[in-house]
């Protein structure tokens, strides 16, 4: 029933307007970090690639039935993440029913979120996406894969995915900090070209979700 509902949701969202959401999770981590990120990304994609996303993103909890109302859910933060058993079951059902979760480590989330991802998909593994993956190929080309937006520990940026039935259902971006690049210009004082690079990569992610 959930798969049928989600297919209907995607059809109607493509015809009229899409709505995306920010994940509000437990554990003490700042799920609310980067408050201007998603609004700026939405504005950019609506202008640059003609998406029709509602300008104000929703906020949704991992255990809520409302999760199934959004084809794309974004998650970020710096610290601890805890999913309850009910959260895990709901997230798994959501992702297997056609939903998509993008997790963007804002620095400090990695050691916690990997454990929670393993709970959602105990038999799955995070697989690093090669630069040849479709998510890097359009509408903007990233020939070297995930771009580096903010420096934290001198590590290269990495994009990991969870695949189910050959479908990318979860994207985890690490040592990149796309969300910081999506923020208002005066938040981090990033150069224009860095912010533009982050926004273009975000547009690629949304384009991939809505067209695959």
Image (cartoon, rainbow, N blue to C red):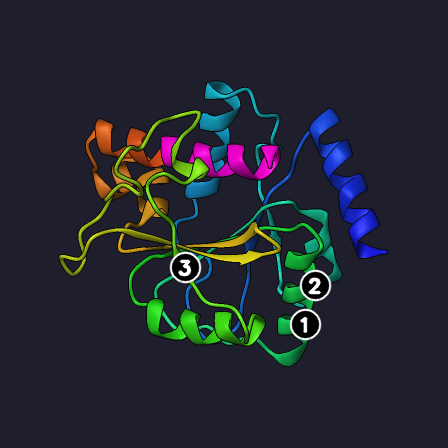
Using residue 117 as the reference point, say whether residue 97 is left or right of it. Answer: right
- Residue ID for mark 2: 93
Question: Disc 2, disc 3: CB below 8 Å?
Answer: no
- Residue at x-position 57% and y-position 25%: 51
Q: Specify few, some or many for label 1: CA neighbours under 10 Å numbering under 14, 14-19, or 20 or more.
A: some
Residue found farthest to the left:
154
Q: Position of residue 109 (x, y in %)?
A: 36, 67
Looking at the rendered image, the disc whose residue lies closer to the viewer, 2 or 3, is 3
The circle on residue 127 is 3
Left or right placement of residue 165 versus residue 82 in this view: right
First reached walking from the N terminus: tag 2 or tag 3: 2
68 to the left or right of 32 = right
Q: Residue at x 13, y 57 (%)?
A: 154
Circle 2 sits in a helix, a strand or a loop, which is it? Answer: helix
Where disc 3 sits, the SS reads strand
Label 3 Cα crowd, 10 Å radius (few <14 / some 14-19 / many 20+): few
- The stretch in magenta equals 200-212
Expressed as whole percent of the image width and height from the top left, the position of residue 207 reads: 52, 32
Q: Mark 2 to mark 3: distance in Å? A: 20 Å
Find residue 75 and report its horizontal and vertical position in percent: 48, 56
Residue at image coords 30%, 29%: 196
């Amino acid at each position: 029933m959930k798969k049928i509902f989600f297919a209907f949701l995607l059809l109607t969202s493509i015809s009229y307007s899409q709505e995306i959401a920010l994940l509000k999770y437990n554990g003490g981590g700042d799920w609310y970090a980067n408050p201007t990120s998603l609004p700026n990304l939405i504005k950019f994609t609506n202008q640059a690639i003609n998406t029709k996303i509602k300008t104000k993103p929703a906020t949704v909890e991992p255990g809520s039935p409302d999760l199934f109302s959004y084809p794309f859910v974004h998650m970020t933060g710096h610290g601890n993440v805890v999913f309850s058993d009910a959260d895990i079951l709901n997230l798994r059902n959501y992702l297997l029913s056609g939903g998509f979760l993008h997790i963007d480590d804002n620095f400090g989330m990695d050691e916690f979120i990997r454990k929670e991802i393993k709970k959602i998909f105990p038999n799955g593994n995070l697989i690093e996406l090669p630069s040849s993956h479709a998510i890097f190929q359009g509408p903007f080309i990233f020939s070297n894969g995930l771009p580096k937006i903010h420096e934290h520990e001198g590590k290269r940026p990495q994009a990991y995915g969870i695949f189910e039935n050959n479908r990318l259902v979860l994207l985890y971006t690490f040592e990149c900090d796309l969300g910081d690049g999506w923020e208002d210009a005066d938040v981090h004082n990033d150069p224009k070209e860095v912010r533009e690079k982050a926004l273009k990569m975000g547009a690629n992610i949304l384009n991939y979700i809505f067209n695959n």
